[in-house]
Image: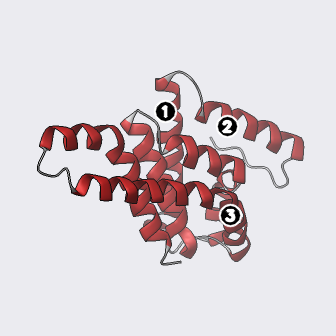
Amino acid sequence: MRWKFDQPSPLLQTESQKLFLKLLSHPSPPVKTETYECTLNLVKDCLGIQNLSREKAAASAAVKFLLHHQVLYEISAFGLQDSAEKVNVAAKDILLFLLKGRLMMTAPAWDRFNEALYPVIPIIQVLFALWRLQSNFTAGLLNQPPVWNSLHYIYGGIWQSMFSLCQRSDHY
């Protein structure tokens, strides 16, 4: 059963957001992983192309809790860099679905997402710059597979995620 509120109280929204942020940054890997995976599933269900005929307002309302700078900061700064592969892949996919979700969001929801994204853009730019620096550095190391493999294993996923996120966000 899904609870629906016409006008949720600001206090309820604030407390819910605090709880959600605590779950996103939970020290227990299973809790954090489950939070990211459930969030990704919700975003997919709401903003997926299968819902193109669905009302935009419903899709926008369902992901409204993600359209806040603190939530996007947590996902971008920590989710994308998490050592658990399931968490960083889910974080990347959440951001990509939100970026691609323009067709499914109302204009005010899209504007809210863009406003929430502005404080996070420097993080994305820094990670992208680090990825480029790493790729330039490792270009000379390609003849030394053990070094490349260890660097790629440790840092490759983070930079590849951010690079692909930056490439895809240029289309909007």
User: Looking at the image, is mark 1 or mark 2 nearer the viewer?
Assistant: 2
Instruction: Kindly identify which residue carries mark 2.
Output: 21
Q: Secondary structure at mark 2?
A: helix
- Local crowd at mark 2 within 10 Å, few (<14), some, or many (≥20)? some
- Residue depicted at 54% across the width and 60% down the height: 125
State left or right for residue 10 relative to residue 133.
right
Q: Quadrant of residue 49?
A: bottom left
Q: Secondary structure at mark 1?
A: helix
In the image shown, does 77 or 64 lie closer to the viewer?
77
Instruction: Kindly identify which residue carries mark 1.
Output: 34
Per the model, the C-alpha gap separating discs 2 and 3 is 19 Å
- Residue depicted at 39% across the width and 56% down the height: 133
User: Looking at the image, is mark 3 or mark 1 nearer the viewer?
Assistant: 3
Three-letter residue code for mark 1: Glu
Tell me the colour scheme of the image: secondary structure
Per the model, the C-alpha gap separating discs 3 and 1 is 27 Å
Instruction: Kindly identify which residue carries mark 3.
Output: 118
